[in-house]
Image (tube, coloured by chain):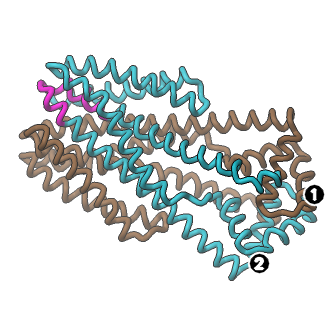
Chain colours: A brown, B cyan
Amino acid sequence: MSESITQPAPDLHPEDHLTSSAMLQDVVIGLSDGLTVPFALAAGLSGAVASSGLVITAGLAEIVAGSIAMGLGGYLAGRTEVEHYETELGRERREVHEVPDVERAEVDELLAEMGLSAATRQLALKELTADPEQWVRFMMKYELGLEEPDPKQAPKSAVTISSAYAVGGLIPLSAYFFTATPTEGLAWSAGITLVCLTVFGYLKSRMTGQPPVAGALKMALVGTLAAAAAFGIARLVSG
Amino acid sequence: MSESITQPAPDLHPEDHLTSSAMLQDVVIGLSDGLTVPFALAAGLSGAVASSGLVITAGLAEIVAGSIAMGLGGYLAGRTEVEHYETELGRERREVHEVPDVERAEVDELLAEMGLSAATRQLALKELTADPEQWVRFMMKYELGLEEPDPKQAPKSAVTISSAYAVGGLIPLSAYFFTATPTEGLAWSAGITLVCLTVFGYLKSRMTGQPPVAGALKMALVGTLAAAAAFGIARLVSG
């Protein structure tokens, strides 16, 4: 254990892993919604309008709107996380300084919850609260369950989610570019999108360690249900 | 500290708080996207089509599609979290049983990171690993940072997110029901939605302890940008 602390390499690897999995998670968020919502909207309109041009116009408007709303939403959520961490850090620092006895009691309570005896807690408490910065770090991580967020993550997330949504949305919509009528477009769009959703659901589940075939079926089901419902409501309203 | 363990009341309160804030978080997720995306789509189409009926058809199709995709998405994410916790719990139980020395070394490493001395670690290690179930709970919470998720949360989240999205989406769309042309509808829709986004952004920031005026302006900005971009692309494609 102490060996791994002196070597920087094993510490760097998990961080790399974390960054790439945060990006992967953003791609998954963007693709899931991008493949389903524009697909379902286009499918819904196909049952209600006669022109492929209208389906394409609405589809592109949705992709732009959704990709901006999701990207900015991801950015603001990331910023809020950073600000929340900083606010809490400031508060813990103040509390350790101003009401050390209250904070000491909180550490003791956490140690008791872990299952330590009164005697061991007394020793541990003295060591954990010897250095104020270490004490604050302990409170942040183990009392509040907060890890320091990377401030560069928010803009990265915004771009990734936004692009993944746009890419996902253009796949189902592309079918309407190359077909004459919305009905024909819908047939191709449904075929292409179901294949993509199945492959995407399979890969996503494999990466997260879930049963991949069930994951593939689930994604395909979400897309089908959303598209069928949108088709139904559009028919109902327009007819 | 030990007093609070024998009394059930102080333990119940934080859980209540957690449940209601999980629901509030779902409402916020659904409303943010519901207020922005259908608003932006309808705004985009207003610049491209002559009939309010078409804007309403597309808007309703989007609301249904988005609310199903988001609700089911929330449900599946919740289920995955429960399954992930169970998988990891099974693995920790197996490891504690099969490779106790490796797991003991991991506990020791965590205690060293907290800042405990070798002597205190030795005592703590013995106490923490005395009961296998307590040991497993320690690993789940402090090594993996996993809290046991509530299996009832996934269906609750699905319904909340989905309803909040539909409610949010019907607000901007309602303007087109009562106006004669898409242009007139857009003017009312933009007015109503910007007011709602501002109020919503203000309340959301107040609840999460962020500066509320900045939060109000941010939400209004996201909606405006998404709507302007959708309007621009729809004009470009249709004209």
Secondary structure under the numbered disc 1 in the rendered image: helix
Specify whether residue A40 is painted magenta: no
Looking at the image, residue A124 sits to the left or right of residue B158; the answer is: right
Looking at the image, residue A158 sits to the left or right of residue A152; the answer is: left
Gap between marks 2 and 1 measured at Cα: 24 Å
Which three-letter amino acid code belongs to the residue tagged 2?
Answer: Asp
The quadrant holding residue B93 is bottom right
Residue B205: mark: none
Asked whether residue A28 is in view, the answer is no
Residue B101: mark: 2
Q: How many marks?
A: 2
Indicate whether B150 appears above or below B172.
below
| Residue at horizontal 60 percent and vertical 44 percent from the top | B17
| Residue at horizontal 59 percent and vertical 39 percent from the top | A81
Q: Which residue is mark 1?
A: A123
Indicate whether A101 appears above or below A111.
above
Secondary structure under the numbered disc 2 in the rendered image: helix
Residue in front for this viewpoint, B47 or B178: B178
The crowd level at tag 1 (other Cα within 10 Å; few <14, some 14-19, many 20+) is some
Q: Chain of mark 2?
A: B
Q: Estimate the x, y position of residue A204 in percent, counting from the top left.
A: 42, 61
Q: Estimate the x, y position of residue A208 in percent, counting from the top left.
A: 48, 63
Specify whether residue B40 is painted magenta: yes
Q: Chain of mark 1?
A: A
| Residue at horizontal 27 percent and vertical 18 percent from the top | B188
Are tags 2 and 1 found on a single chain?
no
Which three-letter amino acid code belongs to the residue tagged 1?
Answer: Leu
Looking at the image, residue A157 sits to the left or right of residue A118; the answer is: left
The magenta segment is B38-57
Look at the image and tell me in which quarter the N terminus of chain A lies.
bottom right
